[in-house]
Image (cartoon, grey):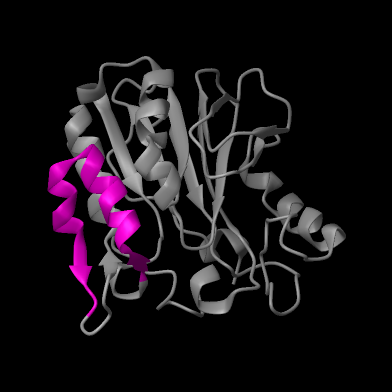
């Protein structure tokens, strides 16, 4: 199967000049436990293989993506003028051909674009970044009235497999009372809860005024043959979620 067919094309009503691509774990050359299209250089895989995996994506991209050094924060890079590797957890672009990317293996990748196709963004929304406002920071950096934005939620850990402590729930609820709806008590689990990353992200987007939200129906943990999952495997690869203006 061709590599492009092993990737996911986001299904969302984005303008025609907005291009996006979600990789899976399929189509590369890395060996176990990184098999096979691992794009992360920081997980212990052979760097030569990782770089070859990245090069396999080159035919689908207009330029080298701005690979981020992700730290579960809220800093937003600008792909129009950033180096190829910067410390940030989100990226935006206004110029044609500048490629934004975030890498995940359970955390939630969020893609954003405006309805006129003038700016795009990608955010790495693990629970820390999501709670601290990485989506809000990305929207602010895009500089567009939020109700003109569209969002796509990529593959992430589903609620069934995302167990967290009471302190995580408290942190979200302190920011937004309705976040309580995204946490289910674990039966017999004491102060443990199952968190719904997708719902938490939708709540933050809705609070900003962004209502055109697509995606959010996959599970990295459950779909073992298709996705990497840190929660499931511990040592594993990373997938990429890319967006750019054509």
**Can you give x and y, in whole percent of width and height, for residue 188 in the image?**
23, 85
**Can you give x and y, in whole percent of width and height, for residue 96 in the image?**
55, 21
Q: Does the magenta-highlighted stretch encompass residue 246?
A: no
> Which secondary structure dominates the residues rendered in magenta?
helix
Determine the residue positioned at 16% across, 54% down.
Answer: 180
Quadrant location of the N terminus in the rendered image: bottom right
Determine the residue positioned at 68% across, 32% down.
Answer: 86
Using the rendered image of the protein, determine whether residue 227 is visible from the camera's viewpoint: no
Looking at the picture, tell me which residue is in the foreground, 158 or 122: 158
Q: Is residue 245 above or below residue 233?
A: above
**Can you give x and y, in whole percent of width and height, for residue 142 in the image?**
41, 20
Determine the residue positioned at 62% across, 45% down.
Answer: 60
- Is residue 176 left or right of 119 when viewed as pictured? left
- Is residue 173 left or right of 35 when viewed as pictured? left
Q: Is residue 230 above or below residue 204?
A: below
Q: Is residue 77 above or below residue 236?
A: above
Q: Does the magenta-highlighted stretch encompass residue 170?
A: yes
Q: Quadrant of residue 6?
A: bottom right
Name the residue at the right extreme: 48
Looking at the picture, tell me which residue is in the foreground, 180 or 189: 189
Number of numbered callouts drawn: 0
Determine the residue positioned at 58% across, 68% down.
Answer: 25
Q: Which residues are magenta?
A: 162-186
**Can you give x and y, in whole percent of width and height, for residue 150 in the image?**
28, 34
Using the rendered image of the protein, determine whether residue 92 is visible from the camera's viewpoint: yes
């Amino acid at each position: 199967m061709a590599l492009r067919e092993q990737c996911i094309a986001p299904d969302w009503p984005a303008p025609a000049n907005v291009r996006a691509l979600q990789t899976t774990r399929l189509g590369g050359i890395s060996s176990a436990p990184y098999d096979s299209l691992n794009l992360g250089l920081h997980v212990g895989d052979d760097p030569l293989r990782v770089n070859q995996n990245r090069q396999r994506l080159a035919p689908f991209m207009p330029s080298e993506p701005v690979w981020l050094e992700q730290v579960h924060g809220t800093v937003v890079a600008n792909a129009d003028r950033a180096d190829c590797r910067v410390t940030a957890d989100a990226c935006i672009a206004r110029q044609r051909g500048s490629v934004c990317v975030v890498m995940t293996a359970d955390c939630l990748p969020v893609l954003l674009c405006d309805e006129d196709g003038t700016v795009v963004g990608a955010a790495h929304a693990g629970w820390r970044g999501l709670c601290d406002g990485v989506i809000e920071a990305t929207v602010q950096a895009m500089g567009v009235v939020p109700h003109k934005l569209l969002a796509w939620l990529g593959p992430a850990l589903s609620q069934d497999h995302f167990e967290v402590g009471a302190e995580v729930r408290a942190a979200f609820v302190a920011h937004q009372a309705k976040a309580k709806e995204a946490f289910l008590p674990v039966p017999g689990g004491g102060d443990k809860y199952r968190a719904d990353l997708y719902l938490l992200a939708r709540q933050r987007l809705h609070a900003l005024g962004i209502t055109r939200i697509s995606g959010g129906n996959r599970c990295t943990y459950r779909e073992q043959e298709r996705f990497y999952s840190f929660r499931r495997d511990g040592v594993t690869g990373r997938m990429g979620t890319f967006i750019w203006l054509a």
